[in-house]
Image (tube, helix red, strand yellow):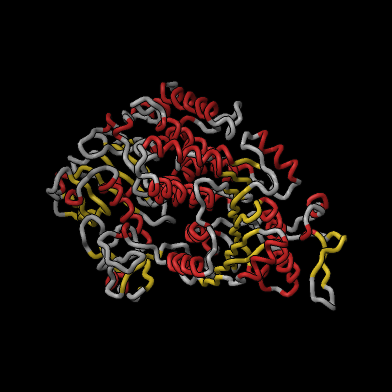
């Protein structure tokens, strides 16, 4: 790139001219344009201001911050956010009062109520980024009561929950919404963290099924009256609607839910989650918004117990764009986790269909996409919860979930195939996939010691080096145990067709340690390594691991073709990824030039933050590999 680019962390809604302010510990307020201190509680306020404008339709001109509330000459205090009825910003024109706190803070509710003295004020909100309370202001005791949500601009409280599909709004962000739902259930139901996650997952499924139904009316909704009745212990139509929807979910997704499965939440908790999600359309919410939220939600609940560290988005993009799957190529991830490689592969192929077949009708292209997703995508995970999560992830992008099932990918093939057929995921046989992409569990903490598994693998045996020839060969003696990442190398090659290609995340020890030279010898006996990309040390730290790793690309050949290929051109593409798009704390790093302006991958200035590129060098690595591929006539 011709323009020098540096890393600067940005907050939501930040202006392209904020570099100087950021260096001084300041940011520009989203709604008012005022300069404010960049503190944790400020990030929460900016998030809610953006929601007020983009989800509730209030104008920036109706919003003020640090508005001084006073009674006569007595100053009561500055309100964090005030929404006025129109652009007249006076005490007697307040519509909604909002108090925001940083995530660790639980106080402020009494303060919010004490500030609510304007006779024109109808509503109040307390929000700390992961918990939320909506209040209606009353004329007499108890003066406040909780409600499902505040109304959008031009609506009343009676309109909340009476949604039709056309009324739903794409979410500007979902991470805090999912977190808020989790925290409410965790605090009120006494369930373990994993159980909470599963209950939220059920309700997301219900939401998706309702959105995809033919009815113009929403069934996934709750009104203020229904919420009141539930809190009073009365039966009403809300509970019946949600249970009917879950019955439909179990019918439509019998491969995900058992017919006897139930929602293990009290009606009041179900009502809360529905109130948080009901105004959004998950279908029309941008893919990056729901994908990021879903992945973050998964990371927080399912990470790292056996070394299964989730694959960050830039690494998924590297794997998919370098392997470049086509719409007639089958793909497998044998340790699919939350389905990242499968989702990115599906989207990559779908974009190719749109680009190459623009002559076809939209409905025809849609049929091609759905057929591809159901026919060519397969995923396996040993963790039943993660298999379910992966299915949900695919469903958020409109499917491919039927090819995902629970199994141990290191088990004998007969057992894997039996489980695949039982799950109606099709046959899973050796040598049947054009492509494998995976980030297997790795680390020394969880060695595989089961002899019935180890005996299937050459790498489950001890190896010996011939002192004369220097060649490595497998012995008949089984190892006492082997780390799963090494066994996954062999199993992935077994899954591949002749000429099939593979991307696998491996700890650098597999590539460098002298004690593992036999592993590299095994790889050379069965495949060509055509690319290795070293990943930054912080790649997996925000997601629960500090393991230094690389992304390794292989192509499988039988011995004769392998020798021919090596003799023809043994070149290997070596890439070093130094910028992953986020910092060590997982905060997004956006690409900007030295003037502080947003830029895209080409270094061109763009006006909006959402049009700017994440500051990662993965696009340059992909472009360099494309040149390498053409130069060395790599035929895919």
Taking depth in this image into account, of 369 and 587 the one nearest to the observer is 369
Residue 433, position as x, y percentages in the image: 62, 48
* Farthest residue, direction right: 476
Quick check: 90 left or right of 300?
Answer: left
Residue 67, position as x, y percentages in the image: 21, 55
Q: Residue at x 60, y 64 (%)?
A: 552
Residue 380, position as x, y percentages in the image: 63, 45
Taking depth in this image into account, of 18 and 597 the one nearest to the observer is 597
Is residue 302 something one can see in this rendering?
yes
Q: On screen, 545 above or below 287?
A: below
Quick check: 137 left or right of 528?
Answer: left
The quadrant the N terminus occupies is bottom left
Looking at the image, how many numbered discs can be counted on the residues? 0
The answer to which image quadrant residue 30 occupies is bottom left
* Farthest residue, direction bottom: 468
The answer to which image quadrant residue 251 occupies is top right
Taking depth in this image into account, of 206 and 138 the one nearest to the observer is 206
Is residue 176 something one can see in this rendering?
no
The answer to which image quadrant residue 479 occupies is bottom right
Residue 373, position as x, y percentages in the image: 51, 41
Q: Residue at x 60, y 70 (%)?
A: 569
* Farthest residue, direction left: 88
Q: On screen, 315 above or below 354?
A: below
Q: Which residue is drawn at 41% across and 28% down?
A: 213
């Amino acid at each position: 790139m011709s323009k020098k680019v540096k890393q600067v962390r940005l907050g939501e809604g930040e202006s392209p001219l904020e570099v100087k302010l950021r260096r001084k510990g300041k940011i520009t307020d989203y709604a008012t344009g005022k300069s404010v201190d960049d503190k944790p509680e400020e990030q929460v306020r900016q998030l809610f201001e953006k929601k007020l404008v983009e989800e509730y339709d209030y104008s920036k001109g109706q919003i003020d911050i640090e508005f001084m509330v006073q009674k006569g000459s007595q100053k009561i205090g500055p309100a964090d956010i005030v929404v006025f009825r129109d652009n007249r910003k006076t005490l007697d024109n307040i519509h909604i009062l909002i108090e925001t706190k940083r995530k660790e803070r639980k106080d402020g509710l009494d303060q919010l109520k004490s500030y609510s003295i304007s006779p024109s004020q109808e509503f109040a909100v307390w929000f700390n980024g992961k918990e939320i309370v909506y209040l209606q202001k009353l004329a007499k005791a108890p003066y406040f009561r909780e409600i499902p949500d505040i109304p959008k601009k031009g609506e009343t409280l009676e309109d909340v929950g009476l949604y039709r599909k056309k009324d739903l709004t794409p979410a500007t962000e979902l991470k805090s919404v999912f977190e808020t739902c989790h925290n409410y259930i965790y605090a009120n139901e006494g369930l373990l963290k994993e159980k909470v996650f599963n209950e939220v997952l059920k309700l997301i499924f219900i939401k998706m099924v309702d959105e995809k139904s033919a009815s113009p009316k929403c069934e996934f909704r709750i009104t203020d009256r229904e919420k009141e009745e539930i809190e009073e212990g009365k039966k009403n139509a809300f509970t019946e609607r949600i249970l009917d929807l879950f019955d439909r979910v179990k019918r439509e997704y019998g491969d995900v839910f058992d017919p006897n499965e139930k929602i293990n939440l009290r009606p009041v908790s179900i009502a809360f989650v529905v109130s948080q999600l009901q105004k959004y359309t998950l279908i029309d919410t941008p893919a990056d918004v729901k994908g990021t939220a879903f992945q973050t939600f998964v990371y927080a609940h399912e990470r790292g117990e056996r070394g299964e560290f989730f694959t960050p988005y830039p690494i998924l993009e590297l794997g998919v764009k370098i392997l470049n799957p086509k719409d007639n190529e089958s793909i497998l991830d044998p340790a699919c986790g939350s389905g990242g490689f499968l989702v990115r592969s599906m989207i990559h192929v779908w974009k190719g269909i749109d680009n190459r077949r623009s002559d076809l009708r939209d409905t025809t292209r849609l049929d091609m996409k759905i057929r591809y997703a159901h026919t060519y995508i397969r995923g396996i995970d040993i963790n039943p919860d993660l298999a379910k999560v992966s299915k949900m992830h695919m469903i958020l992008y409109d499917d491919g979930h039927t090819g995902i099932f629970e199994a141990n990918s290191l088990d004998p093939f007969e057992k894997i195939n039996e489980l695949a057929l039982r799950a109606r995921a099709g046959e899973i046989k050796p040598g049947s996939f054009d492509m494998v992409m995976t980030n297997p569990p790795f680390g020394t903490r969880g060695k595989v010691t089961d002899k019935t598994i180890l005996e299937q693998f050459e790498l489950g045996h001890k190896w010996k080096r011939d002192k004369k020839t220097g060649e490595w060969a497998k012995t008949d003696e089984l190892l006492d145990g082997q780390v799963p990442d090494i066994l996954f190398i062999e199993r992935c090659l077994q899954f591949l067709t002749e000429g099939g290609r593979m991307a696998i995340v491996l700890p650098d020890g597999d590539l460098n340690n002298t004690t593992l030279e036999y592993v590299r010898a095994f790889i050379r006996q069965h495949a060509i390594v055509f690319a290795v990309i070293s990943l930054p040390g912080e790649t997996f730290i925000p997601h629960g691991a500090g393991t230094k790793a690389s992304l390794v690309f292989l192509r499988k050949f039988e011995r004769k073709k392998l020798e021919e290929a090596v003799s023809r051109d043994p070149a290997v593409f070596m890439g070093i990824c130094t910028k992953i798009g986020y910092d060590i704390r997982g905060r997004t790093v956006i690409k900007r030039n030295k003037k502080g302006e947003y830029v895209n991958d080409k270094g061109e200035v763009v006006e909006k933050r959402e049009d700017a590129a994440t500051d990662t060098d993965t696009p340059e690595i992909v472009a360099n590999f494309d040149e390498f591929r053409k130069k060395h006539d790599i035929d895919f």
